[in-house]
Image (tube, rainbow, N blue to C red):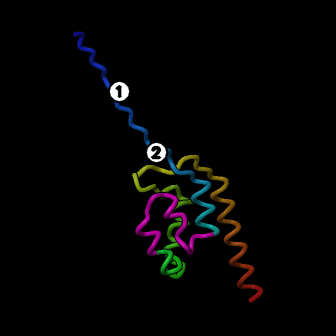
Amino acid sequence: MENNTVEKEQVIYAAPQKSFTVTLLLNFFLGFLGIHRFYTGYIGIGIAQLLTFGGCGIWTLIDYIMIIANKYNDKDDRPLADYNKQLAIGSLIVILILSLACIIFN
């Protein structure tokens, strides 16, 4: 009787990095619900932000600043993929214009 041994190759699939653009857009439009936290794997903090409307906007603002400064990592402590400095600056300009418009027309 022949002894056939089959070696099983262990394959480890790493989860792909989370996208900077998707994270920034989720924070920009749905940050008060913490959706960007769910996307990047921070489920517990995402639930807390969901229940407190982004910490009354404070968590959302802090996360936004961290994202545009490229200091925001996913739950596996990996930086966001495809960082785009122009998009970060553009979104900051839009926020400033909207803030000024609210102050002027209020």
Label count reads: 2
| Residue 5, image x, y percentages | 27, 18
Q: Is residue 55 magenta?
A: no
Residue located at (69% from left, 66% from top):
93
| Residue 92, image x, y percentages | 65, 65
| Residue kind at label 1, given as amino acid type | Glu
Q: Quadrant of the rendered structure where residue 11 is?
A: top left
Residue located at (30% from left, 22% from top):
7
Residue located at (50% from left, 75% from top):
50
Looking at this view, is 25 or 92 the one in front? 25
Task: Classify mark 1: residues with Cα within 10 Å, few (<14), some (14-19) or many (20+).
Answer: few
Residue located at (54% from left, 60% from top):
67
| Residue that protrudes farthest toward the top in the picture | 1
From the image, state whether disc 1 or disc 2 is nearer to you.
Answer: 1
| Residue that protrudes farthest toward the front in the picture | 1
Question: On the image, numbered disc 2 is attached to which residue?
Answer: 15
Residue 4 drawn above or below residue 12 = above
Q: Secondary structure at mark 2?
A: loop
| Residue kind at label 2, given as amino acid type | Ala
What distance separates the C-alpha of mark 1 from that of mark 2? 19 Å
Residue stretch in magenta:
30-48
Apparent side of residue 40 relative to residue 5 in the rendered image (left or right): right
Q: Quadrant of the rendered structure where residue 97 is?
A: bottom right
| Residue 96, image x, y percentages | 68, 72
Apparent side of residue 63 relative to residue 11 in the rendered image (left or right): right
Question: On the image, numbered disc 1 is attached to which residue?
Answer: 9
| Residue 1, image x, y percentages | 22, 10
Q: Secondary structure at mark 1?
A: loop
